[in-house]
Image (spheres, helix red, strand yellow):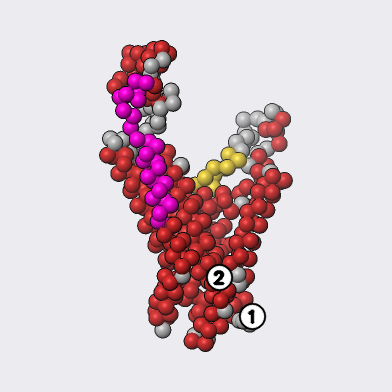
Amino acid sequence: GPMRGLLVELTRLRWRRAVLLLLVAVVVLPALLLATTAWNTRPMSDAEIDSLLSERYAQREVARCERRPEQYVDYSGEAVEPEGCREMIAGWYGGRQTLRPAQELDGTVLAASTLVLALVLLLGTTFVGHDWNTGSMSNQLLFEPRRGRVWATKAVAVTLTCLLLATAVLSAYWWGVTTLASVRDVAVADGVVGDGYEQALRTGVLAGATALGGYALTMLFRSTVATVGVLFGLAVANGALLGIVGQTTQRWTPPLNVMAVMQGQVTYYDESAIAPECRFGTAGPADDCDPERTLTAGDGGLYLGSALLLACGASVVSFRRRDVP
């Protein structure tokens, strides 16, 4: 039945050496990124702070801050405590920055997410590319002649694996960041912690969809190299189009929509949407001269989902009708 087919595909996934390497990379690379972040934001020792504040100007700044702390604000916009002056000003003079979970969400967490998406895309295409490359696809169809079921079983196996793994890895990454912050006595707002896990969940779902997209295209082109080539071509064309047409097409570029899904929403500039009067400085108070637009996760998901549906539809039709060598 379908369940047995799924277990066979999961086993096949596990036995592929290239797939196994990619699965390991999905876990190891974010772990290395987290370790690097922890090291780069480690607290400064008193000796390090003293050497950074040895300049006359720095000492004067510290004295001024300790005298009037209310005139200084820290990273979160809060008034700084007098005892926090030395470390804050040492940071200005080339010292290490403190770990800030809210900033990490737009920084290394996003970097780890992007890395995971790139790896699962390769995983989705490599998984089935091997079947076409070795000619084992025709053998598989001897055991299960219903092509639609073969396509779907493989799709479910690769999507589920990548969705669950990416969600687990990125949730663990965020847990590492927040745990590190609490160990170092860095205050983290309650909302920020929830935002991080929501971002991990959205990116996990996106990772499943990305792997499915890579798989569907490879089933269509019947080659890993062709799929990677087409995706690379699209990425180059996307950059060229932005360069030629300008920001007006940005709303319809895949990277912006991917960012919107990962971060919940993203702002971009669209000069074409504002009234012409704004450009000539003759705009009245009723004219909307703000070129900033917001793209929500829902909008991004709809855009990417439509593209995925199109790829899957073409892939299924092709697999059912074309001869399998």
Quadrant occupied by the N terminus: bottom left
- Specify the amino acid type for callout 2: Gly
Query: In the rendered view, would you say 66 is above or below 161?
Result: above
Residue drawn at (68%, 53%) of the image: 237
Range drawn in magenta: 26-51
Q: Looking at the image, is 102 positioned above or below residue 30?
A: above
Residue beneath the point at 59% across and 77% down:
319
Residue tagged 2:
129
Question: Residue 100 placed where, x, y %?
Answer: 38, 37
> Which residue is at 31% across, 35% downward?
186
- What crowding class fits label 2: few (fewer than 14 Cα within 10 Å), some (14-19), or many (20 or more)? many
Q: Is residue 225 left or right of residue 167?
A: right
Which label is found at residue 322? 1
Q: Nearer the viewer, residue 62 or 224?
A: 224
Few, some or many C-alpha atoms within 10 Å of disc 1 (few <14, some 14-19, many ≥20)?
few
Residue shown at 62%/81% (left/top)? Answer: 325
Cα separation, mark 2 vs mark 1, equals: 16 Å
